[in-house]
Each structure stands twice: as structure tokens, then as C-alpha cells.
Amino acid sequence: MGFGSTVDLIGVGMLMAALGLMIATLLNTQSAGPQTESLVLRSEGPVFLFDGDVLVDCNASARAVLSRSITRGGDWQRLLAFLAKHFENIDEKLSQLPRLGALAEVAETSSGKAMLMQAELSGGLTKIALIDPDLAEGPGVALAMSHRALETEVQDLRHAIASAPVLMWRESQSGEITWANNAYVLLASAAQSSSRELTWPLPRLFERAATLQSAQGQRQSVAVGAGKTVWFDLTTQAEDTGMLCFASPVDAAVTAENTLREFMQTLSKTFAQLPIGLAIFDKDRRLQMFNPALVELTTLPPDFLTRKPSMLAVLDAMRDRNLLPEPKDYHSWRRQIIEMERAAASGLFQENWALPDGQTFRVTGRPHPNGGLALMIEDISGEMQRSRRYRSDLEISQSVIDQLDDAIVVFDQGGHLLWCNSAYTALWNHDPAASLGDSTIRSVAAQWKSLTAPTQLWTEIDEFIHTIGSREPWSKELRLLDGRLLTCAIAPLAAGSTMVAFRGAGPKRTGNGLEPMSGSATAAR
């Protein structure tokens, strides 16, 4: 084989190697599949390639769009937020892409030209391309799309600030208003005199000292119109060139606080004027509140009570002043206090304390919110004295009436028996206190009727008792079954009551008291 043949062989080999390299390159390209569609991704307009909601690839213009999005979430959510500003219901339309395969949407831009969006689902990948006629000419499409996204974001922020109900403004270091949102301008116009026009720089609505303090939630008011005031909470933030200030309206909170303050003042006045001593303990049984009446009743020093003593310390101090019932021993007293606390916490405690000096306290315990306990002490010494005096008067009156020979019984306006003397009990063999039910004129008249001769007297007495209005006393005779004659006198009393008295056949008196007459029910039968 000569030199020429050798050259031919080398050439053929190099040709075969080049052909093999080309075939390998083509095979690698085919195995890469749709992910290497670089012709589309090298387009000047934004092009996105998604696998589900995961971004697989995008060009520079697409990255510029995503980088300017303020929406939180993944790349798919941020792209949808951008598209939603230009295309209606784009989320629903893209969800139909698996069924349609391809989708094209047109939207009008701010310049009146059309923006085109093309979406295609192929090989399990979603390709979305945007074509904006405003930006299609010339180089720098990525920078232009970033500018477009930035403009959209700025418009959104301007709209949000203009619509915000919160006042926002900037102050220079000299205190001059350099910028303000719509809410500030509107309030400044309302606070301005009607004869003056609103000019720049805008007038100050709040004291500069408040904004310079940089405190959070300062309460300030602004007068608008005749007699009307609006309230705000101020928040400020220092900047290099001045202050950024915010004012949130709190009229509802101020009104609620004023109403609560007035209610508390009224409650405090009422609380201070109560004649009942009131002590409120928290869940740890430490005194949190008391009124002047407690000091007067217990004679405990106010400085002792203001130190928030425990409930046991308060009761110990009262015991030292003989203001508690003295038990047999100290241990039983401590046990009694614990039982009282438990009963009061469940709302069941109330008892009267008879003190050694003759005073009587009514002590009531009631549960208080959050596990607290309210203890009320009332001096009922006068009430107890009046009650004892009343019972004494009743006993004396009863003793006096029992000495009368006439048998007397009293009914109220409804016909219920209120009272009778011992002569009545002996005459008619009827003791109302021994009966289980209430005695009425009709049940009593049945007893009388069984011991007397027939008469219309009982019906007349029944009618007289139930008569409303002016009544005159009267009397009438009746006869017992043993033949003896009685005089029955009927007379009206106060409050519509009626007294019925029987004379002429009362019980005989003996040294030991009253003795039933021979014409009693037993003898008559």
C-alpha cells in the first residue's frame, strides 16, 4: 500500500469519526426531550417552562417578571399573580390546558395595544410565552419587562396607600409636611377653616412633639367642624431625612373608654355610699377592693386594708376586735373559716354573727369572676332589735287577748284565719295551730255549723268578710245545740280584715286557765 492509499484511509477515518460525533449529538438531543427547546427560550419575550407548578426553565425576560412580583409563594403563584392583572380568570383558563392542549389570550395594555399570552402543554410540560407589542421593538426586553412589572407594583402600592383609612405622611427634619396620603389630605381639608384654601405645604394636624417622641400608640385628637373631635393613635418611624408617621382612627375605642370610665365613676360613687361593707378578694384570697362602709363596720385601719392582706389576716384582725363569734377553740374557728370560704365560693354562704357586744352582723359570701370572692357584711342589729320587740309585742298582745272572756277570731279579706284567742279555742274545740292546712271562713263555718242550730249567720259572715268597700259592724244571736244562746258580733278591721266575737257562753275560768264549757262538741254529741 502506497503513501496515497494511506492518506485516503486517514481521510475516510476522519470522515467516519465526524459522522459518528454528529450521530451521537443528535441522539443526545433526542434523549433530552422537550426540556431543550432552547429556540423558544432564547426568545426576547418572557417564556416560562413549568413541570406542574415547578419552574423548569425561563429566559432573562421571564426572570425579570418573577423578580418584581410581590406575591408570596412559588414561581407558579407569582406568575399567576402577574397574569391576573392583565388577563381575566386566567387561573381557570390555564386549568383547562390539559383538555385543550393550547391556549391563546389577548389583553389590552395601558397604551391601547394588545398583549398576547400563548400557553401550550406538551410532553407533560407547560410552556407560557408573553408577547408585549409595547416592548417588542429594540433590545433590552428583559429590562423593559422588569420595568413593566415595577410599574404595576407601584400602581398597586399607590392605590393601596390612596385607599387606606390610616393617615400617612412624611415630615422633614424641620417639621414640614413633605408628603401625605389621601386620608391625611381629606382630614386636613375638614379641619381647615372654610374661608381658607388648602395649600402646600400641608398644615400640621398633630403636635410635633408627639411625632418626635417616636412612641407607639400615642393618643391625639383633631378638631373638625363645630364641636366635633376625632381621635387617633400615632406611630412614627425615624428616617434619614425626617419622620414617617401613621395615625390610626380610634374614635370607637375612645367612646368605649369614656363610657367605661363614666360607668366606673358612677359605680364607684354607688360603691362608696353603700351601707353594707364589701370586701372583694382575688383567686389567691387577697383583698383587692373595699368600700368605706367596711372600714366603719370593722374599724380596721385603711392603711392595713390597702396593703392587700389575705382573707385570713382580715378575719384575724376582726377577731382581735371582737367582731367575730368566739368559738370554743382556735382550731375549730380556723376550720369554720375554711368551710365559710368553700361555701362562699360556691354561692351558698350566709349567716348571722351575734357579737359579744350585742351587735349582729349578716355575713354573705358570693363567688366573684376569675375565681374571686366577694364578702358582704351588714349590720342588722337594729333589725334584730325591732324583730325581738315585735315578737315581744305580739306575745304581750296575745296574753292580753287570751284573758278576755269573749271568743275572738280574725280573718283577712280573702277569708283566711289570721288569729284567735284561747277562749275561741275552748268554745269551738278548734285550734288553728294544730291543723296542717290553712283555715278559711268556710272550713271554720263548717265547724261552727256542726255545733249550732240551723242559721243563715254563717253565710252572712262569709259574705261580709269578702265584701270590698265600706262596712259597718253588726251582731246577731245564735243557739248552741245544748240550748244556750250566744251573741255573735262582727266588726271590720284595718286592711280589710274582719273580727268575729262570740259572747254569752264562754268557757269557765279555773285557777289553771280555761276550761271548755259543757256545750262543747264532745258534750253536744
Image: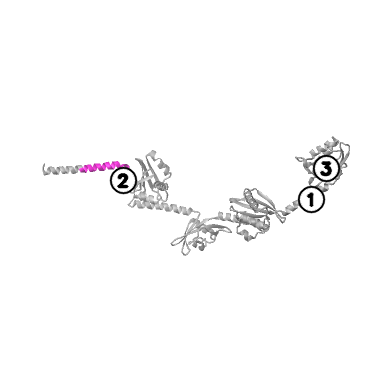
Residue at 75% over, 52% down: 386
Residue at 41% over, 42% down: 93
Which residue was labeled with disc 2?
38
Give the class, few, some or many, for how many residues have Cα within 10 Å of label 1's Cα (few <14, many ≥20): few
Instruction: Calculate the distance from the C-alpha at mark 1 to the C-alpha at mark 2.
Output: 117 Å
Judged left or right of residue 470, residue 195 is: left
Front disc: 1 or 2: 1
Residue 231 locus on image (x, y percent): 55, 57
Dot 3: what SS?
Answer: helix
Residue 149 locus on image (x, y percent): 39, 51
Question: Residue 28 in magenta?
Answer: yes
Which residue is more in the foreground, 235 or 108?
235
Which residue is more in the foreground, 102 or 461?
461
Q: Is residue 358 above or below residue 469?
A: below
Question: As shown in the figure, which amino acid type bears the numbered disc 3?
Answer: Tyr
Q: Which of marks 2 and 1 precedes in the sequence?
A: 2
Q: Which of marks 3 and 2 precedes in the sequence?
A: 2
Q: Judge whether residue 448 can be spotted in this image.
A: yes
> Residue 439 sits in which quadrant?
top right
Q: In this view, does 427 lie above or below 286?
A: above
Which residue was labeled with disc 1?
393
Question: As shown in the figure, which amino acid type bears the numbered disc 1?
Answer: Asp
Question: As shown in the figure, which amino acid type bears the numbered disc 2?
Answer: Ser
Q: Residue 424 carries which label?
A: 3
The range drawn in magenta is 17-43
Marks 1 and 2 in Cβ contact (< 8 Å): no
